[in-house]
């Protein structure tokens, strides 16, 4: 009887622990996602009557407007979508691999690695607004690059006042400023690798790149896979510092900044209902990609 009572108390304690642990993420989801976004979801199916009555009609007009503009001959959405995909591919296929490779060479303590580490960390230490201002000066009118063009007798390039160069100028800034963001995660994962594994690779004749691809990457795959998954989540929200450089002008607009403009009026009039519908559409489109990447990385699968 005593043993049964102790076992029952143990089972009750285990159940209570599970309930408490599950309650934390459930409450967080209900509050920070459902409660915060419920109004946006409702607005996606409403259109206001422009007669001063303050009445809203339940309708699918927001979605109809979106698909009509999407197939239009001069569609702003298509340009925003293209730029968003460009920023996403830059992050996924340029910034992420570069961060990994540079962090690996710093991990190997190559000559001058402390200097490179400081240079890479500068965008994290300095405020993004200040860093963007410095970058605008370096490549803008009156800056060193401007003076260089003049010194060789070439017509200066106005990066952020030219549709041919504005997006490229922002991409260079984003690539450099995003390199250090993942260093802490990659550095921590690499430093956790057993030295014996690295030494065994050297004994087997593994060179630098073979060590990176055959030893280091598999060892830090949980960290790398998580970053790949997080990057895929931002497919339709990928964006550079558009507000700091061009405010969406010169063909640099992205989906996230376009929606920002619809809700703040910075690029024209506001339209909360239309912005809400667009957000729902791209959320539904991005969900399958996230599930595919999650499946491919296998970081959440039981071993």
Image: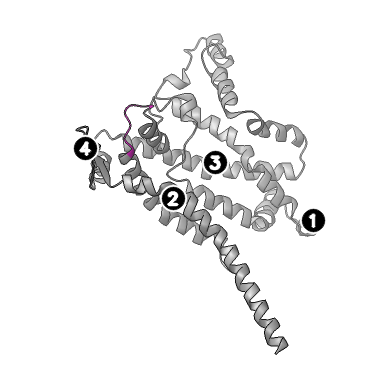
The residue carrying mark 1 is 195
Q: Nearer the viewer, residue 99 or 31?
A: 31
Q: Quadrant of residue 151?
A: top right
The residue carrying mark 4 is 49
The residue carrying mark 2 is 35
Task: Tell me where residue 143 appears, x and y as whole percent.
Answer: 57, 14
> Which stretch did the figure color magenta?
266-272
Which mark is nearer the camera, 1 or 4? Answer: 4
Is residue 289 left or right of 204 when viewed as pictured? Answer: left
Identify the mark nearer the N-term, 4 or 3: 4
Task: Tell me where residue 217 appears, x and y as whole percent.
Answer: 65, 54
Label 1: state its secondary structure.
Answer: helix
How far is disc 2 from disc 3 in space, using C-alphas? 36 Å
The mark found on residue 94 in the picture is 3
Identify the mark nearer the N-term, 1 or 4: 4
Q: Is residue 267 magenta?
A: yes
Q: Is residue 276 above or below residue 125?
A: below
Which mark is nearer the camera, 4 or 3? Answer: 4
Label 4: state its secondary structure.
Answer: loop
How far is disc 1 from disc 4 in space, using C-alphas? 68 Å
Q: Is residue 35 magenta?
A: no
Q: Quadrant of residue 161?
A: top left
Query: Taking the image as drawn, is residue 178 in sight?
Result: yes
How far is disc 3 from disc 1 in space, using C-alphas? 29 Å
Circles 4 and 3, Cβ within 8 Å, touching? The answer is: no
């Amino acid at each position: 009887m005593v043993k049964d009572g102790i076992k029952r108390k143990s089972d009750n304690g285990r159940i209570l622990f599970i309930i408490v642990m599950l309650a934390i993420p459930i409450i967080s989801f209900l509050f920070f996602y459902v409660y915060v976004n419920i109004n946006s979801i409702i607005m996606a199916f409403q259109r206001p009557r422009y007669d001063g009555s303050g009445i809203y009609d339940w309708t699918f007009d927001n979605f109809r407007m979106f698909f009509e503009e999407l197939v239009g001959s001069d569609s702003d959405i298509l340009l925003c979508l293209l730029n968003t995909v460009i920023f996403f591919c830059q992050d996924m296929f340029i910034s992420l691999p570069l961060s990994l490779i540079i962090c690996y060479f710093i991990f190997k303590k190559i000559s001058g690695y402390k200097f490179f580490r400081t240079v890479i960390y500068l965008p994290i230490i300095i405020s993004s607004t200040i860093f963007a201002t410095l970058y605008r000066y370096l490549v803008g009118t009156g800056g060193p690059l401007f003076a260089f063009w003049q010194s060789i007798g070439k017509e200066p390039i106005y990066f952020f006042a030219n549709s041919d160069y504005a997006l490229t100028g922002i991409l260079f800034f984003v690539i450099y400023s995003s390199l250090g963001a993942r260093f802490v995660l990659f550095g921590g994962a690499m430093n956790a690798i057993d030295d014996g594994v690295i030494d065994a690779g050297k004994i087997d004749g593994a060179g630098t790149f073979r060590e990176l691809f055959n030893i280091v990457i598999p060892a830090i795959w949980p960290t790398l896979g998580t970053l790949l998954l997080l990057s895929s989540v931002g497919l339709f929200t990928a964006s550079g510092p558009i507000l700091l450089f061009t405010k969406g002008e010169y063909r640099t607009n992205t989906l996230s900044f376009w929606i920002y403009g619809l809700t703040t009026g910075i690029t024209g009039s506001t339209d909360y209902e239309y912005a809400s519908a667009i957000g729902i559409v791209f959320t539904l489109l991005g969900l399958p990609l996230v599930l595919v990447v999650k499946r491919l990385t296998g970081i959440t699968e039981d071993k």
